[in-house]
Amino acid sequence: MLEHGGRLREASQRYGIALADWLDLSTGIAPYAWPLPMIPASAWARLPEPQDDLEIAARDYYGVSNLLPVAGSQAAIQALPRLLRNATVGIVSPAYAEHAAAWQREGHQLLEISEDAIEGALARLEVLLLVNPNNPTGRRLEPKQLLDWHARLAERGGWLVVDEAFIDCTPEFSLATFSQRPGLIVLRSFGKFFGLAGIRLGFVLAQPSVLLQLAELLGPWTISGPSRVVATALLQDQAAQRQQRERLLADGQRLATLLSAQGLSPSGGCALFQFCCTPQAAEWHGFLAARGILTRLFSTPLSLRFGLPPDEAGWQRLQQALAVFSGERT
């Protein structure tokens, strides 16, 4: 299993700090949601039925005519490589590690390339895969550039796969509305923006033939009845979505400002996290973890990713810990 953020029980055992005493900043998941709807007893008692309103609400939210709900975008990440054989796949790195692992597992030829190397590599690729905004760097690519790469791939039957797990706060950069085009596949995560990672829900936006292949591969009842009820209500709640978007954008900027003030100027980020490249990343990570603040440490490049604190007490706790470490270094 690859390493991910949110492994709080492991950190609790390693540092001897109770679960309830941690400030977990190791993920890019919104640390706050809004009140959940009542779930009828039938949603627990009956098998899920796709004839409810989930697909309608999701199509309206994403502005598309075709999509497939999946058990988190992770389900699509693992399944998509099974739809092709012996493809040459370029993955813009660093990136969410599950993408490379999934394509390698199915025997495809994998090229991990930098953003600057895409132009030179494109002619050799059947599939170009990238995360936008990128995880963990927060780097965001313009839709015009992405659509140009897609058009050149599609001319020879290739795919552009774009993981948009962190794009909900900046929907103007999404390729969702173009996802009906052949060879364009867009992955969206529900849990990150809505603050409900435990619901395990994502969506694949693509042309119907690809969605049909995925649906047949994944099988029936991939989304639980209670999850369908909750997601439908939140996808329809436009007022709460606007409030969530405004709060996340403001808190993302607040986090960047806080880190910069303590000598950790982010090299990238988005509303849900900030990314800091520093030779002292391991020192920062260990110092904060010993005080019950969990961040995500990366070795390539040597860096830290900070998620958002959930409340004012969390903000103050982070600021104080950063200030202590900064003071000890001077």
Image (tube, grey):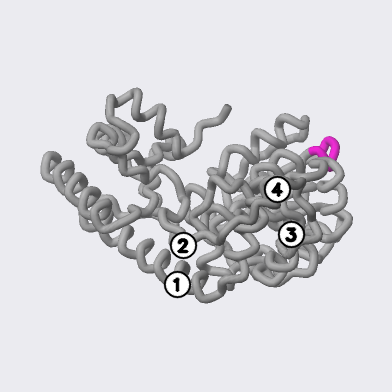
Left/right placement of residue 1 relative to residue 60 reads left
Camera-side residue of 294 and 132: 294
> Disc 3 vs disc 4: Cβ atoms closer than 8 Å?
no
> Disc 2 vs disc 1: Cβ atoms closer than 8 Å?
yes
Residue 248 magenta-highlighted: no
Q: Where is mark 4, residue-wise?
A: 223
Q: State the CA–CA distance, disc 3 to disc 4.
A: 16 Å
Query: Who comes first in sequence, dot 2 or dot 3?
Result: 2
Q: State the CA–CA distance, disc 2 to disc 3.
A: 26 Å
Q: Where is mark 2, residue-wise?
A: 34
Q: Residues within 10 Å of mark 1 (few under 14, many from 20)?
A: few
Residue 84 magenta-highlighted: yes
Discs 2/3, front? 2
Left/right placement of residue 157 relative to residue 315 reads right
Query: Who comes first in sequence, dot 3 or dot 4?
Result: 3
Q: Which mark is residue 243?
A: 1
Dominant SS in magenta:
loop
Question: Could you say where residue 268 lies in the image, as x and y percent from the top left?
Answer: 42, 56
Discs 4/1, front? 4
Q: Residues within 10 Å of mark 2 (few under 14, many from 20)?
A: few
Q: Quadrant of residue 171?
A: bottom right
Q: Where is mark 3, residue-wise?
A: 205
Left/right placement of residue 141 relative to residue 300 reads right
Report the magenta residues as a range: 82-86
